[in-house]
Image (spheres, rainbow, N blue to C red):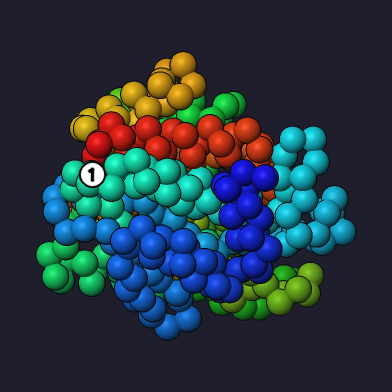
Amino acid sequence: MSATLELLKDLIGRESVTPKDEGCQDVLAARLAPLGFNEERLNFADTQNIWLRRGDAKPLFVFLGHTDVVPTGPLEAWQSPPFEPTIRGGRLYGRGAADMKGSIAAFTTALERFLTKHPDHEGSIAVMMTSDEEGIATHGVVKVVEVLEARNEKIDWCLVGEPSSDKKIGDVIRVGRRGSLCAKLTVAGIQGHVAYPELAENPIHAFAPALKELTEEVWDKGNAFFPPTSLQVSNIHSGTGAENIIPGSVEVLFNLRFCTELDEETIKQRTQAILDRHGLNYAIQWRLSGNPFLTSKGRLIDAAHEAIKTVTGYDTHDDTGGGTSDGRFIAPTGAEVIELGPLNESIHKVNENVGLQDLETLSAIYEQLLIKLLA
């Protein structure tokens, strides 16, 4: 059994459903301590965070990951228990195999090989881990970055181990992500009997034209790196459940995934202008999950392309698709940020898995990236 596979099986066996860590970070600290990594625990509330750094010279390269995983879903739908790593057909099955314990195992063994060969490398290397990425991400990387910024500890290059690959390992790297802005809108009406609509005010009817306008709004046209901004309604709730009552209010949840052509305040102003035009009695609560970020060029991207080509023989594609990631907290500090990890086909699904050979290829790419940047 390879070192990467052995480590990954250990990590999958720990039931670290967000925001739990279940000792995963202890395992990593124990593996990296003999290599000269100093350990710092930066825990906040129920979230476990660890900062492991080797050296204090510039530039600083960081592997960023999360040890928490999403819930399993229906256990009966799994072909093998989600926290009992199982090999079938050349693949390892278990929750977190691809998102993202596979990456963690791969970069840990890459570090072990690299530092054995290059103990006197240039710059510094750090590993940042959190147990609060799959949740609301309020006490994880965002808090660690605040600590680092307060003491002016600057990251130059950051590789996030999110599952970026599409059809084969390394065919896609994420060089940015769209922003995510959530809204909870409540439109008030007057509850009443459906037989006497003149004595009531149906908030669903009042809101319907505004909803049509919101969903048809052309927020922007995107740009060379990002698709156009999209507004999607995720939930509408109204009424008492009775068929003869006009509801007194309607609650709507929606989200905008926005590109670098827009900002949070502009979206809020344009949304509220639409609602105001329709004369609605409403209240709206906003939550910014993250701003868009982009690393359009730089040494990190170049080195990633070179490393993938060296190991696999093929070229990679830069992309900004997908949801949000913890990279959104690193990029505003001025660091170059990319995401490179396993195939994303099975993430968050039952029977999540990663290819055994993909693990070894990914670890080799990570090692080559370190060589090209720091050797």
Q: Residue at x 48, y 81 (%)?
A: 46
Which residue lies under the disc numbered 1? 121
Comparing 348 with 365, the one in front is 365
Q: Residue at x 14, y 54 (%)?
A: 57
The secondary element bearing badge 1 is classed as: loop
In this view, which residue lies farthest toward the bottom? 45
Q: Position of residue 245 (x, y in %)?
A: 72, 74
Against 365, is 45 above or below?
A: below
Q: Is residue 20 visible?
A: yes
| Residue 3 x %, y % | 58, 48
Quadrant of the rendering where the N terminus is positioned? top right
Q: Residue at the spot x=85%, y=50% of the render?
A: 79
Q: Residues within 10 Å of mark 1 (few under 14, many from 20)?
A: some
> Is residue 230 rendered to the left or right of residue 91?
left
Quarter location, residue 146: bottom left
**Who is closer to the viewer here, 75 or 323?**
75
Circle 1: residue type: His
- Percent across and percent down for residue 15 are 66, 68
Confirm whether residue 285 shows in the render.
Answer: no
User: Which quarter of the rendered picture does the C terminus lie within?
Assistant: top left
